[in-house]
Amino acid sequence: MAEQQSDNNNLISCRVCGVIMVKIAKDICPKCFKAEEELFAKIKNFLRANPGASISQVAEYCDCTEDAVHAFIKSGRLERVGLRRIAHQCELCNTTIYEGVMCADCKKKLKDQVKQLRSMNPQQN
Ligand SMILES: [Zn+2]
Ligand SMILES: [Zn+2]
């Protein structure tokens, strides 16, 4: 992404299309915000009708990138509307999972690692 230099802190660039705009509550311009809302509604409806669909199916049907679908999963937005069944990859081992960003195995491993770290530094508990 091109570096934006501005003396005016009230100006930001839209994270989607890069247009320079006055900073409002979001880091996205009204046009892209509307497009994103429409896409989200489309994805939501598709997943309601097709629980467990994969990201690539969603992207194909909704005519968007897989990254866009992934962004909704990562932000927890789909989970918040009760859509927890979408096939995507664990961030660590690429196993197919249906909710969250990590598979159960990786979650457990991570937990064990944290536990281990804690037992090495018991006073920090
Ligand atoms: Zn924009
Ligand atoms: Zn994993």
Image: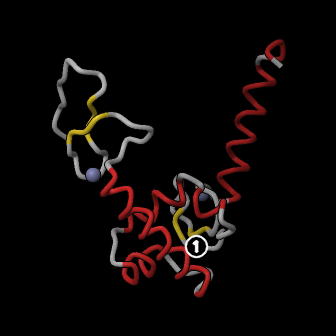
Q: Position of residue 60 (x, y in %)?
A: 37, 81
Instruction: Please state if 77 lies on the left or on the right of 27 as rendered.
Output: right
80 relative to 40, above or below: above
Which residue is the site of mark 1? 86
**Secondary structure of residue under mark 1:** loop
Q: Specify the quadrant that holds the N terminus.
A: top left
Q: Does the residue labelled 1 lie within 8 Å of ligand 2?
A: no
Q: Where is residue 81 in the image (x, y as percent from the top left)?
A: 65, 65
Q: Where is residue 101 in the image (x, y as percent from the top left)?
A: 58, 55
Q: Residue 9 sits in which quadrant?
A: top left
What's the residue at 35%, 47% (across, down)? 28
115 relative to 40, above or below: above
Of the four image quadrants, the one with ligand 2 is: bottom right
Total marks shown come to: 1
Instruction: Please state if 49 lies on the left or on the right of 12 as rendered.
Output: right
Extreme bottom residue here? 49
